[in-house]
Image (cartoon, rainbow, N blue to C red):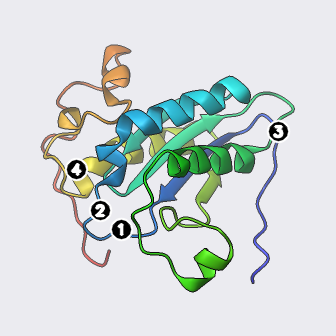
């Protein structure tokens, strides 16, 4: 098994991509959006962190978090969110022999993608990426039409206009 090294900068801001194991024809996250919200809220109550921006699509999600000063443990937070979500769902998924042997559900990909935000420009790029994602994946034609994101909060704060990215042509060749 590869030895993945993750940065551990206390109090940093992080971009995450978290995927379901099966991304094909899977709407589990939006079908159970209230459960996902509860799991995130429960973890924030146990181990606080700030959610700067987020989007949940049918089979993956993107998040921008800032951890408290002196705290770099985002991995435990993600493990608990994913575990709480999985334990709250009925066991109906097909599992590989490895997952059965390890006592794992077949809901989430084991790992997640993380990127430490470097500066204000990097932060702004990732916030835009989060909010354009439902358009990029063909879920809606306007970012404002996707209900499972922080986009409306950014509109309310004057960061975006309601029609932001409504006329953007998304290029998805090669994805």
Disc 3 element: loop
Per the image, the residue denoted by label 2 is 26
Task: Classify mark 2: residues with Cα within 10 Å, few (<14), some (14-19) or many (20+).
Answer: some
Q: Is residue 45 visible?
A: yes
Disc 2 from disc 3: Cα separation: 35 Å
Cβ atoms under marks 2 and 3 closer than 8 Å: no
Q: Position of residue 43 (x, y in %)?
A: 64, 33
Q: Secondary structure at mark 1?
A: loop
**Which of disc 3 and disc 2 is earlier in sequence?**
3
Percent of width and height locating residue 41: 56, 27
Q: CA distance from mark 4 to mark 1?
A: 17 Å
Alpha carbons under labels 3 and 4: distance apart: 33 Å
Residue 169 figure quarter: bottom left
Q: Quadrant of the C terminus?
A: bottom left
Looking at the image, which is closer to me, 37 or 15?
37
Q: Which mark is residue 23?
A: 1
Asked if marks 1 and 2 touch (Cβ < 8 Å), the reply is yes
């Amino acid at each position: 098994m590869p030895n993945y090294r993750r940065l551990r900068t206390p109090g940093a801001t992080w971009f995450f991509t978290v995927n379901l194991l099966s991304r094909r024809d899977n709407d589990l996250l939006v079908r159970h959006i209230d459960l996902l919200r509860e799991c995130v809220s429960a973890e924030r109550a146990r181990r606080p962190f700030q959610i700067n921006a987020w989007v949940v699509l049918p089979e993956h999600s993107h998040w921008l978090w800032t951890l408290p000063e002196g705290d770099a443990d985002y991995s435990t937070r993600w493990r608990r969110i994913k575990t709480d979500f999985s334990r709250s769902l009925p066991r109906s998924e097909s599992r590989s022999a490895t997952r059965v042997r390890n006592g794992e559900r077949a809901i989430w990909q084991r790992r997640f993608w993380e990127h430490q935000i470097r500066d204000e420009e990097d932060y702004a790029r990732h916030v835009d990426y989060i909010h354009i994602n439902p358009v990029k994946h063909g879920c809606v034609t306007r970012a404002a039409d996707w209900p499972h994101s922080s986009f409306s909060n950014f509109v309310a704060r004057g960061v975006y206009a309601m029609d932001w990215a409504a006329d953007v042509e998304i290029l998805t060749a090669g994805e």
